[in-house]
Image (spheres, grey):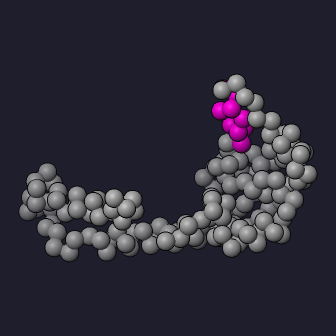
Amino acid sequence: MIIFDDCIALALGGNENYDRTLAEHQDVALFMTPMCASNWMELGREDAASGKRLDLGAMLKGTGMKKVARIDTGLCFEPGFREKVDGFAREFGLERIELPGGTAVAEGCYERAKSRLSAARPRSAPSCRRSCSFNSKGCLEPVLAICRMTRKKFLGD
């Protein structure tokens, strides 16, 4: 099983790449993926609702870090990614830098999970196309068996 430190490690291609990037860019206050860039304004709102105020500006100023990194994963699902990172940089007086990222690691994890699920499928499952209705015990049981095996494999139940 592959374990990643966080979503930044995943976007950078794994924990080793993440460690190397952290070592090379010690002046980066925040590494931003599209999701992070879309939600950075929310960072203090949860605390504010409870009566506390997270002062992100003071926190960043205290670190002495001067940059924010935009990780280009090649995905274009989040409109205005560059503009949102630039807005964060302006708000906190940081310089934006670009870092290459990707989706190869996530795609590999997906393919491994898909192949494991296919391998876990019972070989003698009856065809549901014409021999029975999906609600009958004969066709539903193999589907439930796959669900149980998957749950046990991933959750350890």
Query: In the image, what residue occupies the spot 42% across and 68% down?
Result: 113
| Chain part drawn in magenta | 40-49
Residue 12 shown left or right of residue 136 in the figure? right
Q: Position of residue 99 (x, y in %)?
A: 77, 64
Q: In this picture, is 13 found above or below 139?
A: below
Residue 133 seen in the figure: no
Q: Is residue 141 left or right of residue 11?
A: left
Q: Quadrant of residue 68?
A: bottom right
Q: Which one is nearer the viewer's eye here, 151 or 31? A: 151
Query: Residue 98: where, in percent of width, then height?
Result: 80, 61
Q: Quadrant of residue 43?
A: top right
Which residue sits at x=10%, y=60%? 138
The residue at the point 37 percent across, 72 percent down is 116
Give x and y (percent) for residue 9: 66, 64
* Camera sees residue 153: yes
Q: Looking at the magenta stretch, what is its main secondary structure?
A: helix
Foreground pick, 88 / 48: 48
Answer whether residue 45 is magenta in the image.
yes
13 part of magenta stretch? no
Q: Position of residue 57 (x, y in %)?
A: 84, 39
Which residue is located at x 83 percent, y 69 percent?
Answer: 24
Left or right position of 105 against 139: right
